Image (cartoon, rainbow, N blue to C red):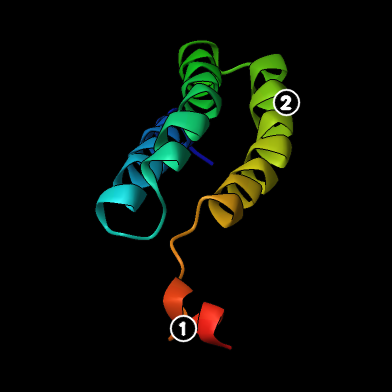
Amino acid sequence: VDPALCRSVAFRHCILLTGMCLAAPALGVTTWLFAVDSLPLNLYLCYLGWRFYQKGDSNSSRKLFRFTLIHIPALLLLMGISKVSFGGHSKEDKRKL
């Protein structure tokens, strides 16, 4: 209903998602390689969010939306590759089995 609010919330979520990706290694969820690998994706997302915030037209909103369709699965893939193991077995325990 409020276009200005929509634009600011979209940009805010882009910034927060970037912050969450940078915080994941510090919280022990992923390795630091995840933060490095996801940074270009997140910076481009923030760029598209900023363009949508500035212009607010349908072209910039479509580009932002379409990139999120690629961005979210790419982040999940990178997070799965870079995750810290949470199993009850260490590498030494696995070698004994």
Q: Residue furthest left?
A: 26
Mark 2 or mark 1, earlier in chain: 2
Query: Which residue is drawn at the image coordinates 68% and 33% (left, top)?
Result: 65
Q: How many marks?
A: 2
Res 86 seen here: no
Left or right: where 12 falls relative to 76: left
Callout 2: helix, strand or loop?
Answer: helix
> Residue at left 50%, top 33%?
38
Tell me the quarter of the picture where residue 52 sits: top right
Q: Nearer the viewer, residue 80 or 45?
A: 80
Say what amino acid the circle numbered 2 marks.
Arg
Q: In the picture shown, does residue 90 fall above or below 8?
A: below
55 or 41: nearer the eye? Answer: 41
Q: Residues within 10 Å of mark 2 (few under 14, many from 20)?
A: few
Front residue of 10/72: it is: 72
Q: In the image, what residue occupies the spot 65% across and 49% down?
A: 77
Local crowd size for mark 1, using a 10 Å CA cut-off: few (<14), some (14–19), many (≥20): few
Quarter assignment of residue 27: bottom left
- Residue where numbered disc 1 is placed: 93
| Mark 2 and mark 1: Cα distance apart in space | 50 Å
Q: Residue at x 45, y 34 (%)?
A: 14
Q: Which residue is mark 2?
A: 62
